[in-house]
Image (cartoon, rainbow, N blue to C red):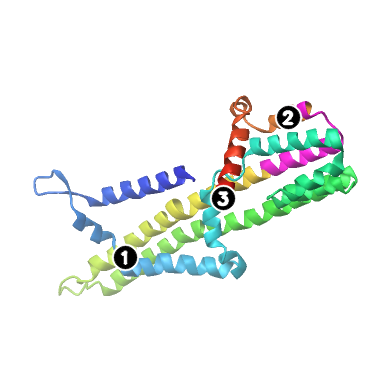
Amino acid sequence: MNITYIIGTVVAMGIMIAGMMFTTDASGAFTTSAKQLMNFLDPASILITVGCTFAVVVASFPPKMLKNLPRHFRIMLNTKKYDPMYYIDQLVELAQVARKNGLLALEEKANAQDDPFFKQAIMLIVDANDADKVRGILNNDIECMSARHDGVAGMYERGSSVAPAFGMVGTLVGLINMLKNMNLSGDGGSSSIGSDMGTALITTLYGCVLAHMIFNPIASNLRTRDEEEVLCKMIIVEGIMSIQSGENPKSLREKLLTFVDQNKREDGGGAKGEKKSRGKKKNEE
């Protein structure tokens, strides 16, 4: 679970709401009042900023991308799916099998893999394909996957750029209404100036909240998940190519560990324990 995203979003929302509740009494002392929150609730601002932002995002991307919104959130919140140490341990185990029994013995291991990319990589060397062909196919798969992920993150970045723009549109709408309704004939001011000015300012607030508290964190987390997946697939490619060339399992582990942080290298046994726990959990289910 991506706990930092949840904590950060909740804390940001909480601080903003707490700030909205602050007010001053007759003596000038600070107090809090829940009634203050109603000052920041404006249906016209919600309609202009939130409604138009989501409408433009829908208009900018194909339906097949939009229908995957729930899947995007699951991916964003899942920080445990791509563990480099898990793949390193798997590859070292494959190298040991191949060294003892040959590459054809890896077919059974390939069929046991849940990761389609990992399975494809193993089968490419089991089928005795040329090394350059294997590397080319796998690298092309990674590039295409990363391009798809970039498009998904771009959808949320699009929302982040559009939201402040419609906040400004709402501001202009409020100012135009205020000026149109302003009475300068000497018979008194317009009674709608307050509500029109409120719409003008609150739309800007909504636009900033949508951009920087909703869309931007989602896009950043999706790009982080993409980087994690690309790293694991690069490890798979390098490991598979080394297995095909008959590299020693110990040397293979040392090579693949260069892809991860020093702290994870020192805690190399953690992935094996996690692998066992995954298997145990799967059996229990």
Task: Reply above or below: 156 against 7.
Answer: below
- In the picture of the structure, the residue carrying the numbered disc 1 is 199
* Residue sitting at the far left: 27
Which of the two labelled residues, at mark 1 and mark 3, occupies the earlier sequence position?
1
* Contact flag, marks 2 and 1 (Cβ < 8 Å): no
- In the picture of the structure, the residue carrying the numbered disc 2 is 253
* Residue 131 point in image, percent of width and height: 88, 43
The residue under label 3 is which amino acid type? Leu
Mark 2 residue element: helix
| Camera-nearest label, 1 or 3 | 3
* Residue 182 point in image, percent of width and height: 25, 71
The residue under label 1 is which amino acid type? Thr
Mark 1 residue element: helix
User: What segment carries the magenta color?
Assistant: 231-250
Q: Quadrant of residue 173?
A: bottom left
For this rendering, which residue is in front, 18 or 72?
A: 72
Q: Quadrant of residue 79?
A: top right
* Residue 240 point in image, percent of width and height: 79, 40
Q: Which secondary structure class fits the magenta region best? A: helix
The residue under label 2 is which amino acid type? Arg
Badge 3: few (under 14), some or many (20 or more) residues near its Cα, within 10 Å? many
